[in-house]
Amino acid sequence: MMNDIPELIRKYDNEGLGKQELGKLRRLLLEDLLNNIVNDLDNIKQWLDKKETKFDTSKLASAIGYDTKPHNIRQSFKGLVKQYEGNLPEGVLKGSAKTNTEIRDENIAEFAAFLTERLGEPDYEWPKNLKGFLYRKGIWAYFLDVSPDEVKSLPSFFNNDSSIEDLLSSIDIKIAKGEVKTLNYERESALDEMSETMGSYALSSLRQKLKAKTEEVIMLREELESTKLELEQFKQKERARLSPGKNAFKLGGIH
């Protein structure tokens, strides 16, 4: 496999590589780098994060080169890095790595700070989609410092963290009012937005139908109970109305 590296590098320099081949080159270079790191434990600390709890993806990405970004390693090679971390001798890494919740909270805080800082820059151009709203994948790509076409999905906190939702909505309003500068991403984002909107609409439609059906069932149950009550009241009134006649008949039969 390592023999593939020179050939891939030659092709990169002369012809360029497709995404799959570029990913293969990055993986091979990362694996080669990690092998060298774990065999040189005296210098391993320079490859760890500040807390020395794991490998620093920024340092790994920089060493690999070929336009490798930290997020490329986090998204595509996380398992490979974890494997090498797990093979390190006991005591090399301090404490425990961050939990998913801690990582999520840090990403939220950093992204919120990024948005807030840009809101303070009058000349900053916000990516705008075909509908005239903030292009979510575009602004997330700006945060990651990558091209929007490299963003395949958005973090879940875009839709379930109120602080981020409020910030994004406030930017939508500023764009609509013309209070900020924008950069059109109509052609790049139209299909994405259409697909997402269709998916969201379908899901929303199903939820609305379920809600309507649930409300209909509740209403029918209430109507049924109300009808039962009215029927019981009618029966009681009918029995009360007939009671005097029955008594009179009985009295008349004595004579």
Image: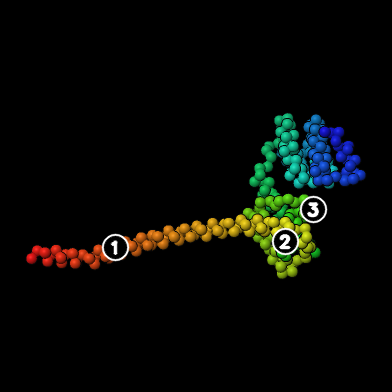
Label 3 or label 2, whichever comes before in sequence order: 2
Q: Residue at x 18, y 64 (%)?
A: 246
Which structural element holds mark 2?
A: loop
Image position of 204 (left or right of 73): left
Mark 3 or 1, closer to the camera: 1
Expressed as whole percent of the image width and height from the top left, the position of residue 97 reads 69, 40
Label 1 or label 2, whichever comes before in sequence order: 2
Which structural element holds mark 3?
A: loop
Q: Residue at x 67, y 55 (%)?
A: 158
Say if mark 3 contacts mark 1, CB within 8 Å. Answer: no
Q: Residue at x 24, y 67 (%)?
A: 241
Residue 147: mark: 3
Q: CA distance from mark 3 to mark 2?
A: 16 Å
Expressed as whole percent of the image width and height from the top left, the position of residue 149 reads 77, 53
Image position of 49 (left or right of 5): left
Going by the numbered disc 2, the residue's amino acid type is Leu
Mark 1 or 2, closer to the camera: 1
Which of 12/63 is in front? Answer: 12
Residue 212: mark: none
- Image height of 186 relative to 82, above or below: below
Dot 2 corresponds to which residue?
Answer: 134
Q: Residue at x 54, y 56 (%)?
A: 210
Expressed as whole percent of the image width and height from the top left, the position of residue 139 reads 74, 57
Dot 1 corresponds to which residue?
Answer: 235
